[in-house]
Image (cartoon, helix red, strand yellow):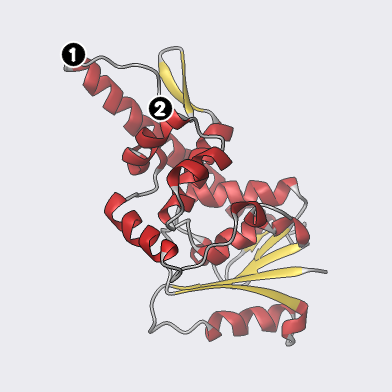
Amino acid sequence: MKIAAYVRVSTDDQNEERQMRAIREAYGESDSELDWYCDLGESGASTSREEYQRLRAHVTEYDLVVAHELDRLGRSFADLAGFVEELREHDVDIDLVNQPIGTVDQDDWMAEMMLNMMMVFADAERKMIRSRVQEGIDGAIAKGKRVGRPPFGYTVEDGFLQQVPSEYVRAQNFIREVRKGREKRSTARFFEIPPSKMRSILQRAEENYDIPFDNDQWRIERAQVEAGKKNLRPLADQNSN
């Protein structure tokens, strides 16, 4: 069995060894049985964590993904639900060694129920994001402003905004990668984002896609990349299995 073990600590004063020890106790004493993905000093609210994204890019290589607790993987229910759906699509199990959540034991109804509850919360979070965008459009109309096409990743059905999952995820991935300091236009081209939508996606990144974007911070990250102080793997490599 091929196992991917994910560990995250948010600050320097947290010790990743506690999480790693619990995973080893559950799935083997030897690191040779586990492939480790460790994000150190990273917030769970951020979905642009390098090791987390690397795990998602290579998840089809594994039979099982293990972590200490749910909030180690992230704090966005919508993003977590997307990750779980990816695992289900590829018949990859998940196990949280310190919580009764997972798919390893098919007879454990509590674990399955907890996972399904997470999906319900994820759906509620997606609806909240969509509602926030809808309120912004309705407010603009009320003020007499002209409102054109819906944001990239959305469509209008029966007068209400609905997310287009494939486009919405591409927009999120585009924002995440640009935040690292990647060149905007070439990154947009990789994720098949129309040039005309690139600026509006970044300007309303948090409001429309729940991922903050600061252009000044991007300039700093971009300068480090261009100066050779920060290395980024080619996007094609990150998305290959």
Is residue 230 placed above or below 205 in the rendered structure?
below
Q: On the image, numbered disc 2 is attached to which residue?
A: 151
**Residue 65 x %, y %:** 68, 64
Residue furthest to the front: 227
Is residue 160 placed above or below 214 in the rendered structure?
above
Whether residue 150 sits left or right of residue 231 in the image: it is left
Disc 1 crowd, CA 10 A, few/some/many (<14, 14-19, 20+): few
Query: Measuring 53% from the left and 62% from the top, which residue is drawn there?
Result: 232
Badge 1 amino acid: Gly
Say which quadrant the N terminus sits in. Answer: bottom right
Front residue (pair 6, 21): 6
Q: What element does badge 1 sit on?
A: loop
Front residue (pair 86, 56): 56
Residue furthest to the right: 1
Question: In the image, which disc is placed on residue 63?
Answer: none
Query: Measuring 27% from the left and 54% from the top, which residue is drawn there?
Result: 216
Label 1 to label 2: alpha-carbon separation = 19 Å
Badge 2 amino acid: Pro
Q: On the image, numbered disc 1 is attached to which residue?
A: 144
**Residue 119 x %, y %:** 56, 45
Query: Measuring 16% from the left and 17% from the top, which residue is drawn there?
Result: 143
Q: How many marks?
A: 2
**Residue 164 x %, y %:** 53, 28
**Residue 230 x %, y %:** 46, 68
